[in-house]
Image (tube, rainbow, N blue to C red):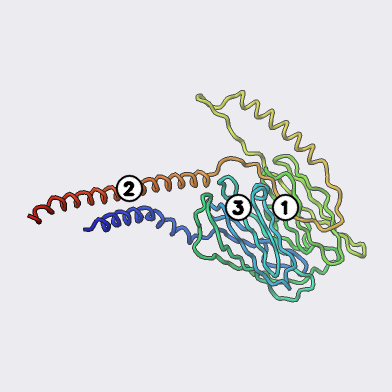
Amino acid sequence: MKKHDFGAWFLLCALLFLFAPGVSAMAEETKPLFAFAAQEEEVRPGGSFAVTCTPVRGDIGAFVLFADFDAEAIANAKAELPESVKSRHVYTSQQDGRFALVYTAKDGGALTEPFTLVFRTERGAEFDAVTVSFSVTDAANAVGQELIDTVQTTEKTFTYVKEPEIGAALLSLIPPTGTLSPSFDPERFQYSLSVPFSVTSLVFDAQPAEGCAVRVNRKNLGAGGSTVDFEFTVTSESGETAVYTVAVTRETKPVTAVTGKTGTSSAAKGKDAASSEKSAESEAAEANVEEAPAETTVVTGEARDADLTQTDAEKNARAAQTDRLVTAAIVLLAVAFGFMLAVLWQRVSEKKGEKSGPRHGA
């Protein structure tokens, strides 16, 4: 074996060792990044419909998402993002029947919460159905590793239905988080909704029928475990009114036990109880302050997320980064060892040549 071939062989082995762990990563690239679910399958001309995008993986650090649609049927598209998601690097744009959302996490974090895309239809649209095509073109984890090797696409189709017969009515009513129960119907006026404790206020997307205006009586929620009524008053041009009521229940605050070597500390329990009572009183006082009625259509708001703990995805990402560093170090050692053997092989060959040279001359 020649000295150059010997060194090349070791270098090839090192490269194969470096890229061997990527085989399992390639298998993960085929897994969908998001699950797309329509809150309702029907839409009225002038009304809105929503699609919830839920992360399927726990290591999404960045992605590019497109929503393509018929611009003659859909007038506007927007993203409803939780506060924790909105505080990161998010860019949205819309033009020529395409809505784009670009997301990048901060500080090595990952996207774990669902978000909602809301589409408002044209009032004068004359279509039996409208289709929205969703595509994820690029995605990476927190350390920059690609998560997909091809564009992931899916479609959602919504059927047009006639406008309600009543004069004063809402065409659609979409909460920024959660789903109404039962599903929205312009001729149904009572609904319920449950939201996490981290949500302190709600701003619904309410689209009134043509020639109508809508007002809402409040924005803030009550204390954890309480239920408050959001009343949407719709008034037509003729003075006819209709009131839609959504009973919103805020879940109770998650209990975090403080434990020691011998069990839970009674002093810590008392402190937590006093703190909870004070927090509940403060929340109840805040909930009594109602928002001034708005004369225009309500726009969507976002839930506040107070969860600042480290996620399993972050731990996995750091562990993966450590594994890659260890792998790189092993590869460098293998390459160095290969070149060292190549140099030794060259020196041995040279010494053999020196010894055999004089004898040949004699």
Label 2 sits on residue: 336
Residue found at x 19% / y 52% = 349
Q: Quadrant of the N terminus?
A: bottom left
Residue found at x 62% / y 39% = 254
Q: Nearer the viewer, mark 2 or mark 1?
A: 2
Q: Nearer the viewer, mark 3 or mark 2?
A: 2
Residue found at x 80% / y 68% = 164
Q: Amino acid at mark 3?
A: Thr
Looking at the image, tell me whether mark 3 or mark 1 is earlier in sequence order. 3
Q: Amino acid at mark 1?
A: Ser
Residue found at x 22% / y 49% = 347
Looking at the image, tell me whether mark 3 or mark 2 is earlier in sequence order. 3
Q: Amino acid at mark 2?
A: Ala
Relative side of 123 to 111, left or right: right
Q: Secondary structure at mark 3?
A: strand
**Mark number, residue 104:** 3
> Considering only vertical position in the picture, is 351 above or below 128?
above
Q: Nearer the viewer, residue 345 or 111?
A: 345
Label 1 sits on residue: 192
Could you tell me residue 116's position as x and y percent? 66, 57
Relative side of 145 to 129, left or right: left
**Within-10-Å neighbours for mark 1: few <14, some 14–19, many 20+:** some
